[in-house]
Image: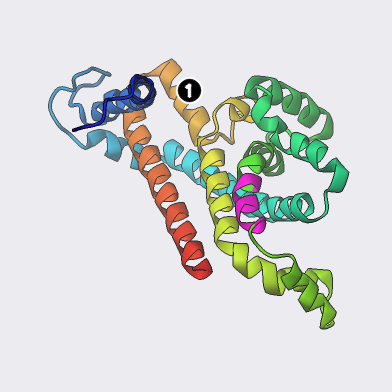
Amino acid sequence: MKPALDPAKLLMNAYVALILAFLILPILIILPMAFSDTDYLTFPPQGFTLHWFGDYFGNSRWMKATGFSLKIAALTAVITAAIATAATYALVRGAGRLGALFQGFLIMPIVVPHIALAVALYLFFQRTGLANTVAGYVMAHSVIAMPFAVFTIAAAMSAVDPTLEDAAMSCGASRFSAFRLVTLPLILPNVLSGGLFAFILSFDEPVITFFLAGIRQKTLPRMMFDNIEQSLTPTIPAIAVLLTAMAVLVLVAAGLLRRVEARRRS
């Protein structure tokens, strides 16, 4: 005899399905528009063409903005991964009574609305001369990416036995050498995953970029906003297809890195 269905479980499954549909449906609507044969956005798309992808890759302004975004995202990934590793080590190994306060500061960029953070950074960068500079972009994007990198790295570092470092230091290694030679190789897949998440967050970030962008140096999200205001063509959905594909590749790469870590521990 089959067990009776649990109404609470059915409601929970239905709720999860509705949330997933709410998140996925806009993507399923916008992506096919990239292949439309018309000069304007329409759904369902009419005809099939790859013209809008060629329009993106053949436009020097789009390519300049994309190259600038890649530069900012790469620098953000490296700097965020390095700082997040140090912050996570302090949080997991030596935060003590201030651990909760330290963790609160780390997650604050998630809690604070990005629009408020963008205004604050804009005013600060205007006074310090960092507005519309590569350093300003990287600093701002590192702030919003830091919590995600820290949580990713903390999941691995908390599983590393601290006595391994103690054993290395008892053999004459310094604390930094013990971390570099013992702990870092064990958490490296998660450090790389944190860097990948920082890369994709920086590359796709629209709100803070809108405040910091200048006239000459514009990131890809800012260029997309300008294109929407001036001439809304299927080039925007074409870029959305490429950004979605890049995000999927980053998630797959992060998943593979986690599998590598799981195999090391097994």
Pick the quarter of the image with the N terminus. Answer: top left
Q: Nearer the viewer, residue 160 or 90?
A: 160
* Residue 154 lies in the magenta stretch: yes
* Residue 178 lies in the magenta stretch: no
Instruction: Tell me the magenta residue range.
Output: 150-158
Main secondary structure found in the magenta portion: helix
Q: Amino acid at mark 1?
A: Asp
Residue 164: image location, x then y, percent: 72, 72
Residue 137: image location, x then y, percent: 66, 39
Q: Describe the element under mark 1 as helix, strand or loop.
A: helix
Residue at horizontal 43 percent and vertical 58 percent from the top: 256
Q: Nearer the viewer, residue 67 or 99?
A: 99
Q: Would residue 266 be found to the left or right of residue 103 on screen?
A: left
263, above or below 159, in the image: below
Q: Nearer the viewer, residue 192 or 76?
A: 192
Give the quadrant of residue 151. Answer: top right
Residue at the limit of the structure toward the left, as seen here: 47
Residue 12: image location, x then y, percent: 39, 23
Residue at the limit of the structure toward the front, as seen here: 1
175, above or below 172, in the image: above
Give the quadrant of residue 213. Answer: top right
Visible residue check, residue 58: no
Q: Nearer the viewer, residue 248 or 171?
A: 171
Visible residue check, residue 139: yes
Which residue lies under the disc numbered 1?
Answer: 226
Q: Would residue 230 be found to the left or right of residue 88 on screen?
A: left
Characterize the local packing of mark 1: few (<14), some (14-19) or many (20 or more) Cα atoms within 10 angstroms: some
Q: Would residue 74 be found to the left or right of residue 53 on screen?
A: right
Residue at the limit of the structure toward the right, as seen here: 97
Q: How is the image coloured?
A: rainbow
Residue 129: image location, x then y, percent: 79, 35
